[in-house]
Amino acid sequence: MTGSRELLIKILYQIVGNYRDLLEIASEEEEAIALGDVSKVQDLLYSRDVLVESLKKIENHRIEATNSLMIEMNVDYSQVETIDDLAKVFDGDDNKFSDKIRSLGVTLNHLVGKLKAANSRNQKLIEISLGHINKMRQNIYDALNGKNETYSSEGKKSNRSSGEHLLNTEL
């Protein structure tokens, strides 16, 4: 394997590593959101931002390495849009390299899919949490303005109560 090919493989492994780290962070975010640990969520968001910036830099290196490799192979770079396209360039010429590229592409696609799913779950958790916060804020506002629908002015439970409840119990 030439130096350009080895460099590209090294860069792709870095990208895979960063996506694995992003997936781990997304999993930790889900746990922190569920526990309501705002400080942990903030720390994880910072870590995620650092990783995303690192990925941007690595992606620039990948583009440079791929361009160099395409020049070496005398291949029009515009013909190579995906990792699978890149692997096809080397089919027959260097099957070991093309198989490695293809394998890393499959791994990246898998990680991206899992990351999208984790981010979607986290988004839903945050939306649910914000819904509860807004409902509690509205309840406080209504109570301060005499519009409380949960309890009457005598402290008795009103039959007009509706909507979401933080706890579904009566005392």
Image: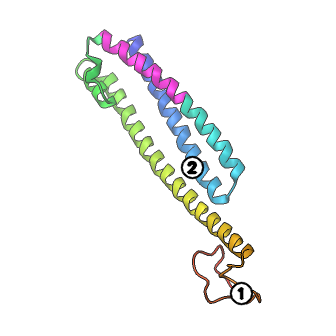
Cα distance between the residues tagged 1 and 2: 43 Å
> Quadrant location of the N terminus?
top left
Examine the structure image and report whether residue 142 is included in the region drawn in magenta: no
The x and y percentages for residue 54 are: 55, 28
Q: Residue furthest right?
A: 154
Query: Helix, strand, or loop for circle 1?
Result: loop
Identify the residue at image location x=50%, y=49%: 119
140 sits to left or right of 118: right
Identify the residue at image location x=50%, y=24%: 58
Quarter of the view holding residue 5: top left
| Towards the viewer: 119 or 140 | 140
Query: Helix, strand, or loop for circle 2?
Result: helix
The x and y percentages for residue 165 are: 62, 75
Q: How is the image coloured?
A: rainbow
Q: Nearer the viewer, mark 1 or mark 2?
A: 1
* Residue 127 visible in image: yes
Residue position marked by numbered label 2 in the rendering:
27
Region in magenta: 54-72
Quarter of the view holding residue 47: top right
The x and y percentages for residue 109 are: 39, 39
Quarter of the view holding residue 80: top left
Depicted 139 relative to depicted 2: above or below? below
* Residue 1 visible in image: no
Q: Amino acid at mark 2?
A: Ser
Q: How many C-alpha atoms fall within 10 Å of the one at disc 1: few (<14), some, or many (≥20)?
A: some
The disc at residue 152 is 1
